[in-house]
Amino acid sequence: MRLGALVRYRQTASRLACLPALAVLAVPLVAARYAPEARMVVECGALFMVCLVQTVRPTLLGWAIVLVWFALWSFETVSLALHPGYRRVLPVALVLVPTMSLLIFRPRAEANERGAWALALLVGLVVVTPLFVV
């Protein structure tokens, strides 16, 4: 399998996969002028751009990067929601809905691209995980 399979345009991929992610990422970008956290704004802005590209030209690697980011963000949010006294459903829904959408509308790998999915997710983990380590 070649690495080119990760960035190849997927004509059969659904463009709906990243629409919920775009809506969720627009919230921190709109609120950026009120938030002093510049790192969050840069991360959300970069991911917003990846999602925009994915809606126009879906690739396996772009999908994996967005999925890994939302999966890690979901893990953080759900673990926070499990603490006593935290009963807010909206933050959990805001991260779980895009994650489920990305899983349901994932791009398909062709028969000659064995392991492309796993490699895309591995590269996505390598790219995104350092952002979540504090």
Image: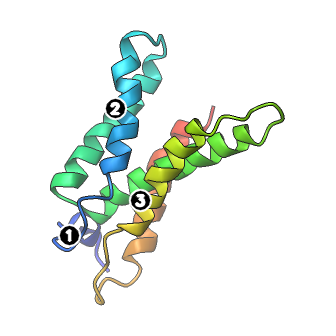
Q: Residue at x 58, y 47 (%)?
A: 74
Compared across the picture, whether 134 is left or right of 87 comes to left
Q: What is the quadrant of the N terminus in the image? A: bottom left
* Marked residue nearer the N-terminal end (3 or 2): 2
Above-or-below relation of 72 to 39: below
| Classed neighbour count for the residue bearing mark 3: other residues with Cα under 10 Å, few (<14), some (14–19), many (≥20) | some
Task: Report which residue position mark 2 lands on.
Answer: 26
Separation of marks 3 and 2 at Cα, in angstroms: 17 Å
Image coordinates of residue 43 in percent, x first then y, are 41, 32
Q: Residue at x 46, y 72 (%)?
A: 118
Q: Residue at x 20, y 48 (%)?
A: 53
Task: Report which residue position mark 1 lands on.
Answer: 10
Image coordinates of residue 6 in percent, x first then y, are 29, 67
Q: Residue at x 38, y 35 (%)?
A: 25
Q: What is the quadrant of the C terminus in the image? A: top right
* Marked residue nearer the N-terminal end (1 or 2): 1
Q: In which quarter of the view is residue 59 placed? A: bottom left
Q: Nearer the viewer, residue 97 or 48?
A: 97
Image depth: mark 1 or mark 2 in front: 2
- Secondary structure beneath dot 3 equals helix
Separation of marks 1 and 2 at Cα, in angstroms: 25 Å
- Secondary structure beneath dot 1 equals loop
What kind of residue is marked 1? Arg
Image coordinates of residue 57 in percent, x first then y, are 17, 57
- Secondary structure beneath dot 2 equals helix
Task: Report which residue position mark 3 lands on.
Answer: 101
Looking at the image, what colour scheme do you see?
rainbow
| Classed neighbour count for the residue bearing mark 1: other residues with Cα under 10 Å, few (<14), some (14–19), many (≥20) | some
Can residue 126 be seen in the rendering of this structure?
Answer: no
Q: Nearer the viewer, residue 31 or 49?
A: 31
